[in-house]
Image (cartoon, grey):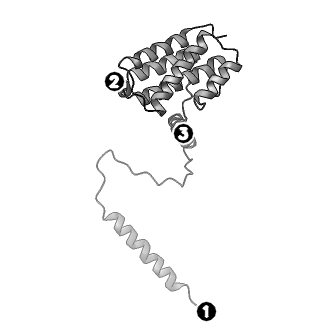
Amino acid sequence: MLSRQPLRDNYRNFAASATVAVASQPALPPGEEIYDLMPARMVGLPLGHLLLQVLTVVVALWLLWLFYRWLTTPVNRPRRTIELSPKQLAMRAIARLEHSPVWQQRQMKEICESLAGILKTFAHDAHAIGIGPAATSDELLESLKSGGIVGQIFARCRDLLNNCDRIKFAGARAEENLADSMLSDLKQLITQEDWR
């Protein structure tokens, strides 16, 4: 069995050395005191501060998400549709033709093609006659007859389409003012109200 004597001697030696170490320290200045160490205390978590930080981060992320949605959401703008009557559409087409280089250079085949197309489109859209610009001149004239259009309107349409066909398909030479007279005839046909 081990004796307890060497342990006691070690303890005494340690206590003596600790006393010497404390005694060797310089004295405290006047007015300074050392109190004994406090026992271990439980330090509480700053729960309120922690919750405030978490709430701040959540609110910041939510605001960033709202900003991202605002940036990426398409804007729904109502589109305005302009409803034009067939007469207005035909007059706009005539104005475009008058300002085009085709009209300025008097390229009669292209001018006649445009005039006939405007007349066919107007007859189809305004009066439900024919099939529109895809119709031939004979088909439009037949539709005019079967639609009850006779007299002056029919004669003016027939003359305009015949002049255009002669220039387009027969290669007839156009007189100097023929384009102007055909354009004025077309304008009168479009502006005339009583087709039937």
Q: Amino acid at mark 1?
A: Met
- Quarter-wise, where is residue 23 in the image? bottom left
Answer left or right for 172 relative to 144.
left
- Figure check: 42 above or below 80: below
Give yes or no for contact between labels 2 and 3 (Cβ–Cβ under 8 Å). no
Q: Which residue is mark 1?
A: 1
User: Picture coordinates of residue 40 (x, y %)?
Assistant: 54, 55
Q: CA distance from mark 2 to mark 3?
A: 59 Å
- Please, is residue 178 above or below residue 4 in the view? above
Q: Amino acid at mark 2?
A: Gln
- Per the image, label 3 sits on a secondary structure element best described as helix
Residue closer to the observer: 143 or 54:
143
Mark 1 or mark 3, which is nearer the start of the sequence? 1
Give me the residue at 61% from left, 20% from top: 123
Residue lying at the far bottom of the rendered structure:
1
**Mark 2 or 3, nearer chain start:** 3
Quadrant location of the N terminus in the rendered image = bottom right
Q: Residues within 10 Å of mark 1 (few under 14, many from 20)?
A: few
Q: CA distance from mark 1 to mark 2?
A: 131 Å
Task: Please tell me whether mark 1 sits on a helix, a strand or a loop.
Answer: loop
The answer to whether the residue labelled 1 contacts the one labelled 2, judged by CB atoms less than 8 Å apart, is no
Q: Which mark is residue 71?
A: none
Tell which circle, 1 or 2, labels the residue nearer the N-terminal end.
Answer: 1
Kindly check if marks 3 and 1 are in contact, taking CB atoms under 8 A apart as contact: no
Where is residue 66, by image quadrant?
A: top right
In the figure, 169 relative to 163: above or below? below
User: Residue at label 3?
Assistant: 65
The x, y position of residue 24, in whole percent, is 30, 65
